[in-house]
Image (cartoon, rainbow, N blue to C red):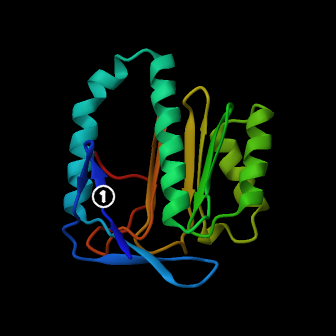
Amino acid sequence: MSDVSHFINGQRAEGSSGRWGDVFNPATGERARRVALGGAAEVDRAVKAAAAAFPGWAATPPPSRARVLFKSTMFVLATNTLASGGLRFYHIKPIGIVAHQSAGDFDLALLGFRLLEMGFSPDRIIGDLAASDRYPEYRQIGVLDRTGAAAASTGNKAHPWSGHIVGENYVAMVNSASNSLPRLNTAWPI
């Protein structure tokens, strides 16, 4: 069994919370990996690293940023697929990204893409997905369109230490972070 640590500022970072979450192979039920659960120290380091990187990132031409994001998303997809024992919860098309976790639902992702194709805004898509979902209170869903507009929703019955932040050109969702963090609503103060 292997351990999965955090990745902050381009480097692997051990967690300071001392807490771990097990990842099970859905086909066999066996424990496949452990993932480090983040605490306030990891969040602070990640936010500081992101703030320091932002000026250079903002000055990068949009096509170059798109290539970097696409490649990093492919890495996350591959890593997530391996870490989860073959499950995939992130879906990408040239029109945008629909991500779901904490009780993900592939059909909702497909509906999200159909709405993106029809030109709906991410905010509208989040509302429409919640209205069509039998269990929105258990889900996290994020939508990012090709213009950089973004929206997300974290259900009030998702993991107690979960939440999301949204900004131009990004959506970040976390669940099972750590009980040392305050309950997240829709954003962390930065």
Q: Where the C terminus falls, by quadrant? A: top left
Tell me if residue 169 can be seen: no
**Location of residue 149 by image quarter:** top right
Q: Front-most of 99 and 150?
A: 99
Q: In the orientation shown, which residue stands out farthest toward the front?
A: 1
Which residue is drawn at the image coordinates 53% and 72% (left, top)?
A: 158
Depth order, front residue of 177/19: 19
Residue 182 place in picture, x, y as percent: 31, 68
Residue 127 seen in this snapshot: yes
Residue 108, percent from left and from top = 74, 57
Above/below status of 70 relative to 31:
above
Estimate the x, y position of residue 4 in percent, counting from the top left. Answer: 35, 65
Q: Quadrant of residue 125?
A: top right
* Left or right placement of residue 166 versus residue 38 in this view: right
Left or right? Give the position of 61 relative to 29. left
Residue shown at 59%/26% (left/top)?
Answer: 147
Name above or below for residue 166 compared with residue 31.
above
| Placement of the N terminus among the 4 image quadrants | bottom left
Residue 19 quadrant: bottom left
Q: Residue at x 31, y 75 (%)?
A: 179
Left or right: 59 in relation to 150: left
**What residue would you read off at disc 1?**
6
Farthest-out residue, bottom: 29
Identity, as a three-letter code, of the amino acid under mark 1 = His
